[in-house]
Amino acid sequence: MGRTNGHSLLLLRLVTLFLFYGAHDLIVVVVVVGGEEEEPYNSAVGDPGMRRDGLRVAWEAWNFCNEVGAEAPLMGSPRGADCFDLLQDESGGSGDKVVHRVSEKDNKLSVGDPFSGEEEEKESITNVDLYAAAKEVYLGKKCEVDDDPPWQFWMIMLKNGNLDTTAALCPENGKKVGPFRPQPGRFPCFGSGCMNQPLVYHNYTALDGDKLSGGLFGTYDLDAADLEAQNVSYYAVTWEKEVGKGGWVFHHVLRTTRKYPWLMLYLRSDATQGFSGGYHYQTRGMTTIVPESPNFKVRLTLDIKKGGGAKSQFYLLDMGSCWKNSGAPCDGDVTTDVTRYSEMIINPEAEAWCRPDRLDECPPYHTFRNGTRVHRTDTARFPHAAYHVYCSPGNAEHAERPTTFCDPYSNPQPQEILQILPHPVWGEYGYPTEKGEGWIGDPRTWELDVGAMSQSLYFYQDPGTPAAKRRWTSIDVGTEIYVSEDAVAEWTLSDFDILISKRCEKSHVSLI
Ligand SMILES: *[C@@H]1O[C@H](CO)[C@@H](O)[C@H](O)[C@H]1NC(C)=O
Ligand SMILES: *[C@@H]1O[C@H](CO)[C@@H](O)[C@H](O)[C@H]1NC(C)=O
Ligand SMILES: *[C@@H]1O[C@H](CO)[C@@H](O)[C@H](O)[C@H]1NC(C)=O
């Protein structure tokens, strides 16, 4: 299963130590490395490090509660893919050919259209939300790479943060609710139709000389005349790679406006089957082995060029999982399944809402790596500045008070969110320890001990229940620009990989 990365990890360590000790102390380095046992890792993604010429990438767009609601005119169901194989020129010349597996007709499939050669249940053909889920599975079949285990694609995720409270489109903690009065400060909406899906334009990947490139772009402004205008919402993702060399670089741009002030754009590695974080339908993706805390790491290179303003929640990893408050795994019952999110916001302008005088915004306790647990009331020792905010699931009957409950409308089911900030307590896991690290002008390759970090975090369960398995079905990077007009974020992501310690792999092979 997967591929071995032990060698490159060891090399990385060697290089790190070499830099640390300096050239004249090389002998020390050798001793240190020699004494250390090499820890073998397997990749948990289909395309480790984004290096495969034959790219597999898909996109999905979500409304406020991760559904479709209504398709944008002429755009089809908001799922699409760009998947191709590169046929090598046998003569050794420059006649390599890009052979696409997903046609324009596939990408434009719209609710009501049958999938070719398939028998679907009638409901998933006529219901706009179920149709998008079925389309993802259909595209997954076209893109699937027949490895062992098989995998489908990276996933670009777009989300519109507008909520029309009068439209009654989103449930409250998983339960259907009627319309309620607008709350403009909390839920932006310019009026009827504000929850619309975006216009999506696709440049199929093409080969130019030795360079492969393609992209996706669009806007939420359905009447936009000029996508470059300042007052028009915009997103773009382009991908490029040199044939046979290096890896794919994904370049992202996101712009908010007065009408669309809250937008999200991520590149996700989702599980190849089961649910993925925040999504309650069968998903397709790139993660062949769902990583479980504490035994995995994530490696990636992130170069942030524009931050997206003060309220850009730029996630150096956003991870989604799901378990019930009883600790049981989720089963699709949206009234008891709880989405769990863990996110580090690396925007240095993000402040800690968790403070000694605002304990309702803090998790009940912090666990240091050595296992020492400190309660949030222990003002001297609890690292308040390490937490942006914590909120309890809306259905947590025994949440420790005071607490703030998470927004009940922005997921198909209740959610729990733990957002952390750069701080020395995360340094042991390879995360930034100071504000500004890895931010604009400071591109970095991170190797994050996400498994150990996420194992140490507080998440709610009912008292006396067995600890849930923390299995992260979605791991992504990108930004959520929270209610800001005319903010622009721009970044590139490359080298993405999820690494699972081989020693622990046996307990991880079961897929959700
Ligand atoms: C799409 O292709 C057009 C024409 O080549 C180009 O101008 C544009 O920058 C491309 N955009 C993306 C996002 O790939
Ligand atoms: C953007 O500004 C132009 C020129 O002022 C105006 O015509 C257009 O309606 C505006 N668009 C939006 C979406 O506000
Ligand atoms: C664990 O680490 C914390 C923070 O560094 C420290 O205050 C505490 O004394 C340590 N506990 C033990 C048992 O080493």
Image (cartoon, helix red, strand yellow):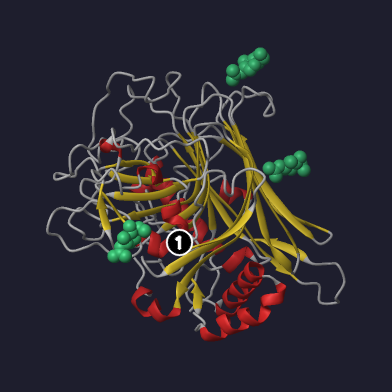
Q: Is 204 placed left or right of 389 in the picture?
A: right
Kindly identify the residue that appears in the image at 14 percent across and 45 percent down.
Answer: 398
Task: Pick the residue in front: 494 or 73.
Answer: 494
Task: Pick the residue in front: 343 or 260.
Answer: 343
The x, y position of residue 139, in whole percent, is 52, 56
The x, y position of residue 254, in whole percent, is 59, 37
Task: Pick the residue in front: 415 or 460.
Answer: 460
Asked if residue 483 is positioned above or below residue 382 in the image, the reply reads: above
Kindly identify the residue that appears in the image at 56 percent across and 31 percent down.
Answer: 309
The x, y position of residue 196, in whole percent, is 47, 30
The x, y position of residue 46, in whole percent, is 53, 68
Asked if residue 372 is positioned above or below residue 173 in the image, the reply reads: below
At label 1, counting other C-alpha atoms closer than 10 Å, the crowd grade (few under 14, some 14-19, many 20 or more) is: some
Q: Is 19 placed left or right of 474 in the picture?
A: right
Task: Pick the residue in front: 382 or 420.
Answer: 382
Q: Residue furthest left?
A: 464
* Dot 1 amino acid type: Tyr
Q: Is residue 456 visible?
A: no
Disc 1: which residue: 429
Asked if residue 394 is positioned above or below residue 146 in the image, the reply reads: above
Residue 413 is drawn in which quadrant?
top left
Looking at the rendering, in which quadrant would you find the C terminus? bottom left
